Image (tube, rainbow, N blue to C red):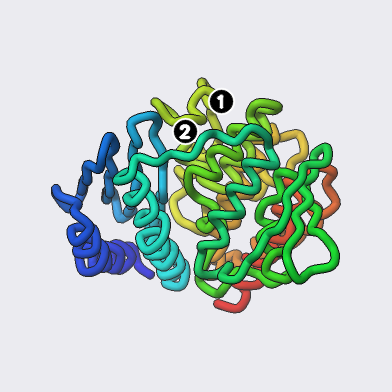
Amino acid sequence: MTKQTTEATVVARYKGHVVPSLRAAGFEGTLANLTLRVGRGQLLAYLSRSGGTVTMGISGNDGRESFILTHVYFAPGEAETETQKKLSAYDACLDTELRRRIEELRSDVVAPPPATLADAARALLAWLARDADFVGLDVTDVKADGRDLIVRVRGRKKPIRVDRTALMTLLRELRGGEPGPEGRDLRYALHGAELVAYLAKIGEESADEARNLWVHLCSAYDLPHGDHRLAPLFLETKTIAKELNTAASGGALVARALPFAQRRSTKLLDRITAIRILTSTLSYAASHRNAESLLEDASSLASSLAKESVPLLRECAWLLDDEIAATRAER
């Protein structure tokens, strides 16, 4: 998509579909800021435009802490399939997570914080079972064994065992080894209070690990701050995201992120940041003048990551492979 058509497509969809849906739910305000007060809490749906880029999302506060339901960034020149993928994920949030959060605020029922990591994982999977792409999921038991989560699912003889940071691998295993449905990044299925509670439990043991997992699953750009429950873990935390995002185009962003992702000497948080940006923007490489070279470098990176000792990096390997395959299919 061109700079003009990306922005025009997103804004038209927002005006024609999102805003009417939000107003029907009781939101009031301007196109840029629509708010809804519910009980002791408040929800904010926002849209901003600058230089062809569009950012839209939904955040809120339940009277105790702030939270982010979704935050999506549309870059000028990104592929149309990537734009539609993000719009579909945003719509899914409107239909599920936003509706649930409004119901919670109306009843003012907030679940007590989990006592253990296994409890947090159990709550996360209970919420996941409500997701349209996990209908029928019946988790019968969740245990923690050292760093690992052991998840038993009705109808399966063998339990699923994954590292506590490998949540995307867990989701893939829960889908029988299948990738996410076309057009949807399954990271969005994990957004919400349950994921925040899970990261908080990990943060009690390792703040670094919680920060890495936030960037990996949520956002490389929007770190928890203010009265967000995870904000104390991110005090004075800086990543290379803004530095990388000064690239002149999507393809240039991929080219700039690759060296940071490849170097083992790079700080782990910055390395994961670079990989996160790569997996979300690799489709830009399809139209880059050095597209084949960039894809070869990305493929080499994925092979290297698969051999890493850090479980989160190994998970990044297959996620990156998926994006490479999708990008090649677009060419």
Give residue 315's mark: none
The residue sitting at 42% across, 64% down in the picture is 92
- Label 2's element? loop
- Label 1's element? helix
- The amino acid on which the numbered mark 1 sits, given as a three-letter code, is Leu
Q: Is residue 66 visible?
A: yes
Residue 11 lies, in percent from the top left, at 25, 62
Vertical placement of residue 98 versus 226, above or below: below
- The amino acid on which the numbered mark 2 sits, given as a three-letter code, is Pro
Q: Is residue 77 visible?
A: no
- Who comes first in sequence, dot 2 or dot 1? 2
Residue 212 lies, in percent from the top left, at 63, 38
Q: Are marks 2 and 1 in contact (CB under 8 Å)?
A: yes
Image side of residue 145 versus residue 52, left or right? right
Image side of residue 37 versus residue 151, left or right? left
The residue sitting at 67% across, 51% down in the picture is 167
Q: Residue beneath label 1, please? A: 233
Q: Nearer the viewer, residue 259 or 312?
A: 312
Q: Residue beneath label 2, please? A: 224
The residue sitting at 43% across, 31% down in the picture is 228
Crowding at dot 1, Cα within 10 Å, few <14 / some 14-19 / many 20+, comes out as some
